[in-house]
Image: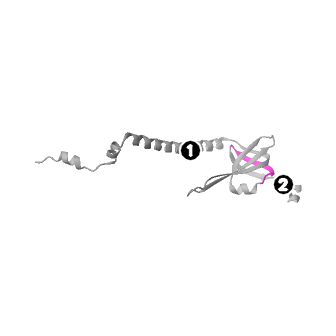
Amino acid sequence: MVNYRGLHAYFREPGFWDFFNETPLGFKLFFGAIFIFIFGSILIAIVTGLSRWLSNNRAPQISEVCKVIGKRDEVSGGSGNSSIRQQHYVAFELRDGSRVELQVKPEEYGLIAEGDQGTVSYQGTRFLAFNREMNFTQHLNM
């Protein structure tokens, strides 16, 4: 009887781990570092977003009389095949002279103008609402 054990081991199909064992150390280190960097970046983004969300949920809802002192857009992306991301911010000056800048939705951004006076409602860094106060002289000047 012929022993085929040695022959069988020689002709067996290679698996993933066989390929991994045969790759050079520099290759393993380089792609391992890239994997750790990508995974770490995703993990940091998730933790940062979650902590901001929790912080905003724990903060009290505040409504204060204010004046709109500025608006700005932040645009990113748009090169090559990537889409454009646009974020809108409105700066409010509160009655005590302090200022707060909040990110607002595009629908709200279009309705708010510099110089508007009213009441801003926010929770932490989350914009909730802006109720414009319009007196009779402002209505006549429009």
Residue farthest toward the left in the current orientation of the protein: 1
Q: Is residue 76 left or right of residue 5?
A: right
141 shown above or below 25: below
Name the foreground residue: 26 vs 65. Answer: 26
Percent position of residue 1, x then y: 10, 48
Q: Which mark is residue 7?
A: none
Per the image, label 1 sits on a secondary structure element best described as helix
Q: Residues within 10 Å of mark 2 (few under 14, many from 20)?
A: few
Q: Residues within 10 Å of mark 1 (few under 14, many from 20)?
A: few
Q: Is residue 29 left or right of residue 115?
A: left
Taking the spot 56% from the left edge, 42% from the top edge, the residue there is: 47
Residue 42 at what x, y percent from top left?
Answer: 53, 45
Q: Amino acid at mark 2?
A: Met
Say which element carries label 2. Answer: loop
Q: Which mark is residue 134?
A: 2
Q: Is residue 38 above or below residue 85?
A: above
The quarter of the rendered structure image containing the C terminus is bottom right
Which stretch did the figure color magenta?
113-124
Q: Position of residue 36 (x, y in %)?
A: 47, 42
Q: Residue at x 65, y 43 (%)?
A: 56
Q: Give, as a three-letter code, the residue at label 1.
A: Ala
The reply to whether discs 2 and 1 touch (Cβ–Cβ < 8 Å) is no
Does the stretch in magenta take in 30?
Answer: no
Question: Badge 1 is on which residue?
Answer: 45
**What residue do we see at 72% from left, 54% from top?**
109
Assess whether residue 116 is covered by the magenta stretch: yes
Q: Position of residue 118 (x, y in %)?
A: 80, 50
Real-space Cα separation, disc 2 to disc 1, in angstroms:
41 Å
Q: Name the image quarter holding residue 27.
A: top left
